Amino acid sequence: MTHDLSPWSMFLHADLVVQMVMVGLALASVATWTVLLAKGWELRACRRAIADGRAVLGQCASLDQALNRLDGKNSPVPALVLAATQELRLSAGLAEDGIKDRVASRLDDELAQLGRTLSTGTGILATIGSVGPFVGLFGTVWGIMNSFIGIAHSQTTNLAVVAPGIAEALLATGMGLIAAIPAVVVFNAFARTITGLKGQAGLAAAEVLRLAGRDLDRHGSSLRRAAE
């Protein structure tokens, strides 16, 4: 008796529970590649936007000038400039001591929010990478258990009869690895990329803080000249 041992045929002849496991792993694999394409495009665009924003900041002498030149740009950098500008406006009339600390605190909040935004969607990769092999192993254990039950009922240990059922069960483990390995690789790659982007955004925040310091010094000089 011959058996078609192609993956599709093994899926069709597998137990219902094993089939459900395979379908779930297939959907997990699709989710991994979807996140790879969508998040990869997002992170690439963010890297370019931060680089462009830093280039603009390096040419500006004040926060207002930076805000005007960055107006309408889809980048995390304008949010940093706006946060610093708002804090300076709220601190108008107060002693200059502590203003830069409050601006730095605002910038830290913006950087933390940026990190959370960039990490959105990557959690599913970690879940698939850690759970996928165990889900596939569950399907394999279930399928092999059914194979041994079938052996007991047929009262034969002929390899030609036993092998197809075991092969169908092992296919679940293979699919678990196929789903998990790319998820782990992509998650680690995204983690490194996000860390790098947060570092670049931190450099942009430092430049914004320098602009805020210039504005404060300029404002203090104007007050001193007016008093004289």
Image (tube, rainbow, N blue to C red):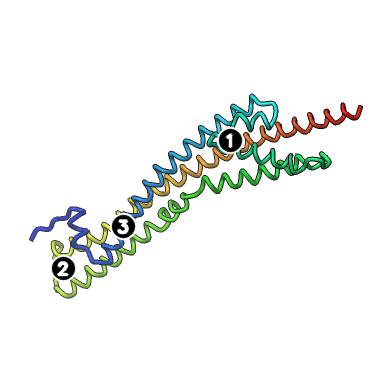
Q: Is residue 126 above or below residue 93?
A: below
Q: Residue at x 69, y 26 (%)?
A: 61
How many other residues sit within 10 Å of disc 2, few (<14), some (14-19) or many (≥20)? few
Q: Which residue lies most toward the right here?
A: 228
The label number, if any, that marks residue 157 in the structure image: 2
Quarter location, residue 195: top right
**Please, what secondary structure does the residue beneath circle 2 have?**
loop
Say which residue label 3 marks: 173
Q: Residue at x 22, y 63 (%)?
A: 14
Spot occupied by residue 167 in the image (x, y as percentages of width and height) = 22, 59
- Disc nearest the viewer among 2 and 1: 1
Real-space CA distance between mark 3 and mark 1, rounded to the nearest whole angstrom:
41 Å
Classify the position of the N terminus by image quarter.
bottom left
Foreground of the two, 35 or 67: 67
Q: Are marks 3 and 1 in contact (CB under 8 Å)?
A: no
Position of residue 152 relative to residue 224, above or below, is below
Residue 113 on image: x %, y %:
59, 47
Q: Which mark is residue 200?
A: 1
Left or right for 112, reference 4: right
Under mark 2, the amino acid is Thr
